Amino acid sequence: MSADRAKRRKIICKCCDQPGENRGYGWCVTCYARWVARGRPAEGPPAPYENLPAREYKPKPIPERCRNGLHVLIGDNLIRIDNGGWRCRACQEATLAAIAERQAAAWRAKYDALHAGHDVVVRRDGHRLCRTCTPKPVAKKPADPRAAYNVLHAGHNVTVSDRGRLYCHTCRRRELDIDEIAVERAERGEAPPVLTPAEKELAILRMRSWGLTYREIGERIGCSLHTAWYVCNMRQARDAAAARAAYLRRSDLLLR
């Protein structure tokens, strides 16, 4: 607090009737400042927020060069401000770059102090890496697909084919199981919710031997038209006679 302000006495302001420090003429500091800002009118300080003059921003003259005298204020290098002022874009970018460099230098000093005596290297992107504190990555061994297969088919009849692939006869036998009643229901258009691939194949070949189209077969069994065509094409049953022969071969093999 200044010496002049310490000597001010406490009064009740004649303008706002509030207690405050005497600034002059029996007015408080706020009312006196408002009176000066309004041009010292003869009637005294105006009421707060009364007849506030519109604040005009007059454009300031723009020199040829910036305040540092380094850059020409023309084109994109000139930044205009709403209050009529201006800035130099080059100086602003240089200032931001200097701030970023100071922050990076402080971070590097802190990093060096934290990892003093360690094996610190600089990566290609400029960042530092402490090999002492960073654990070395452990090379993971590729997963053995046979181990997962054995876990999935534990207790099943698993053999190895000529190509070295694992083959589960237990699960395959389930796919080859045939329920003759389910096949007959599928042929009548009353297919059960679940049909094994073998049952679906026999039903398709049987209906194809009757001369039904692929669309009619799909509607009865509940499969797509492409599935019906694929089964007949795989068994070379493109017409009724070939389908009848293929049905007899497959039924004799599967129902044996």
Image (tube, rainbow, N blue to C red):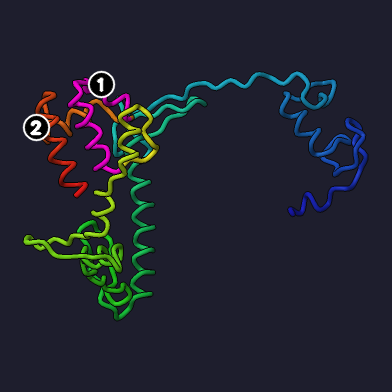
Amino acid carrying mark 1 in the image? Arg
Q: Main secondary structure of the magenta part?
A: helix
**With respect to residue 172, does 180 lie above or below?**
above
**With respect to residue 139, does 103 lie above or below?**
above
Q: Position of residue 227 (x, y in %)?
A: 22, 31
**Which residue corresponds to mark 1?**
215
Relative to residue 16, is residue 189 drawn left or right?
left
In the image, which residues are magenta? Answer: 196-221
**Which residue corresponds to mark 2?**
236
Q: Report the quarter where the N terminus lies.
A: bottom right
**With respect to residue 24, does 150 lie above or below?**
below
Q: Is residue 46 magenta?
A: no
Q: Residue furthest left?
A: 162
**With respect to residue 169, does 72 lie above or below?**
above
Relative to residue 72, is residue 56 drawn left or right?
right
At a point 29% along the width and 72% down the height, the residue shown is 130
Task: Name the foreground residue: 209 vs 5.
Answer: 209
Instruction: Give the mark, 2 or 1, whose residue is nearer the N terminus.
Output: 1
